[in-house]
Image (cartoon, helix red, strand yellow):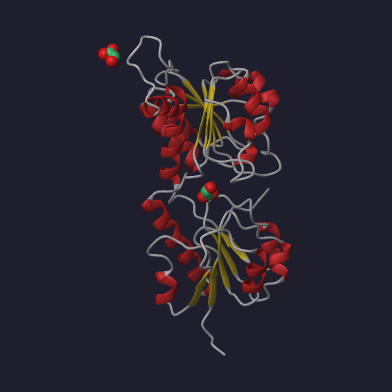
């Protein structure tokens, strides 16, 4: 019987992959197919493993823990952890870690890109050019919304929300925010960000960008009621988690021009897209690419490996999932 710790990885990872674990002499197995792992395979593999690297597409729940007698740590390859029952894991003595910080700039860049793309109608313009139908400049073509000088409402002022605020500052935007807890006065001052209620944020903002974790309180925080409070020129951006938005209500609001546009990187039932969103020109959609840069993904892999090494060597995890509630 080998005494080397066994680590199972539920999806192929970008280079340099799990080098650090191999260097430590660990035994590592990676699910070889580039699609979400079959549940039966996952349940079978966790029966033997000391550590698991999981994806946001894997549901790590009681059934998984019931099959995993020697599991010590689940390193989630994501900053979000709504796919894991963290409280139950800790009750069973299993640590859960995430990948904060290393993907902050990548995700904030994408959020700001979606903000610009939705405001200035990048995808409609691109389609017009590629269709061969563009017949030249006109004073009235594809008029968008201004960005400079506008008010950005940030829901969830953690690391990513703050990084978006820093970008917005460079565009001369005013910033309001809402967060479960008000952030330090020094941060508010540095970002020139004003704390407001969620209702005020919806009614005052020209842009609303979502950066809150998904939990029972945040599910559908954008719904028919909140959309009704928004300006008819407003633009909503979501790079956090799809279920923060009631997509049916959003599609209806976009359809009747109750708000101007949306930029979405995440969806309620990925990879299924609410059919009505598919038909609307005023929504820019990306396939969940928030952290998808070469450097962010490389650093996420490394952080997963370092968390596993720490926990299996009886050290505190570097980036444990925050305790929920
Ligand atoms: C991606 O969605 C993440 O949570 O890192
Ligand atoms: C537009 O191209 C302009 O020159 O104003």
Which image quadrant is residue 63 in?
bottom right
The answer, for residue 22, to whether it is visible in the render is yes
The vertical placement of 1 against 322, above or below, is: below
Return the residue nearer the eye: 244 or 263.
Answer: 263
The residue at 63%/18% (across/down) is 256
The picture places residue 129, in percent across and down from the top left corner, at: 37, 26
Query: Where is the N terminus found, in terms of image quarters?
Result: bottom right
The vertical placement of 119 against 16, above or below, is: above
Return the residue nearer the eye: 285 or 302.
Answer: 285
Horizontally, residue 67 falls left or right of residue 152, namely: right
The vertical placement of 160 against 189, above or below, is: below
The picture places residue 105, in percent across and down from the top left corner, at: 41, 43
Return the residue nearer the eye: 252 or 233.
Answer: 252
Horizontally, residue 71 falls left or right of residue 7, namely: right
The residue at 35%/11% (across/down) is 138
Q: Residue furthest top?
A: 139
The quadrant of the rendered image in which ligand 2 is seen is top left
Q: Residue furthest bottom?
A: 1
The residue at 42%/28% (across/down) is 127
Horizontally, residue 142 falls left or right of residue 266, namely: left
The picture places residue 158, in percent across and down from the top left corner, at: 52, 41
How many numbered marks does the figure carry?
A: 0
The picture places residue 322, in percent across and down from the top left corner, at: 59, 52
The answer, for residue 186, to whether it is visible in the render is no
Horizontally, residue 306 falls left or right of residue 203, namely: left
The residue at 65%/33% (across/down) is 247
């Amino acid at each position: 019987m080998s005494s080397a710790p066994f680590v199972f990885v539920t999806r192929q990872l970008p280079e340099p992959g799990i080098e650090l674990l191999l260097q430590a002499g660990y035994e590592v197995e990676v699910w070889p197919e580039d699609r979400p792992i079959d549940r039966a395979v996952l349940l079978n593999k966790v029966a033997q493993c000391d550590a698991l690297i999981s994806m946001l597409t894997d549901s790590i729940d009681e059934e998984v823990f019931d099959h995993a007698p020697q599991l010590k740590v689940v390193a989630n390859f994501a900053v979000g952890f709504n796919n894991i029952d963290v409280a139950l894991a800790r009750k069973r003595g299993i640590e859960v870690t995430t990948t904060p910080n290393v993907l902050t700039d990548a995700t904030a860049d994408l959020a700001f890109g979606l903000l610009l793309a939705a405001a200035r109608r990048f995808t409609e313009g691109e389609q017009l050019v590629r269709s061969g139908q563009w017949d030249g400049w006109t004073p009235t073509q594809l008029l968008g919304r201004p960005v400079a000088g506008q008010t950005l409402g940030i829901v969830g002022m953690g690391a990513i929300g703050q990084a978006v605020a820093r970008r917005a500052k460079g565009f001369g935007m005013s910033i309001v925010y809402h967060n479960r807890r008000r952030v330090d006065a020094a941060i508010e001052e540095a970002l020139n960000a004003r704390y407001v209620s969620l209702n005020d944020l919806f009614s005052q903002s020209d842009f609303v960008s979502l950066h809150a974790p998904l939990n029972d309180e945040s599910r559908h925080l954008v719904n028919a009621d909140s959309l009704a409070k928004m300006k008819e020129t407003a633009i909503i951006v979501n790079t956090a988690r799809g279920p923060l938005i009631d997509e049916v209500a959003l599609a209806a609001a976009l359809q009747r021009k109750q708000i101007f546009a949306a930029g979405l990187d995440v969806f309620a039932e990925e990879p299924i897209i609410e059919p009505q969103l598919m038909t609307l020109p005023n929504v820019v959609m990306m396939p969940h690419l928030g952290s998808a840069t070469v450097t962010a993904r490389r650093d996420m892999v490394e952080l997963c490996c370092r968390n596993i090494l720490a926990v299996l060597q009886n050290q505190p995890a570097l980036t444990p999932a925050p305790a929920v509630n």
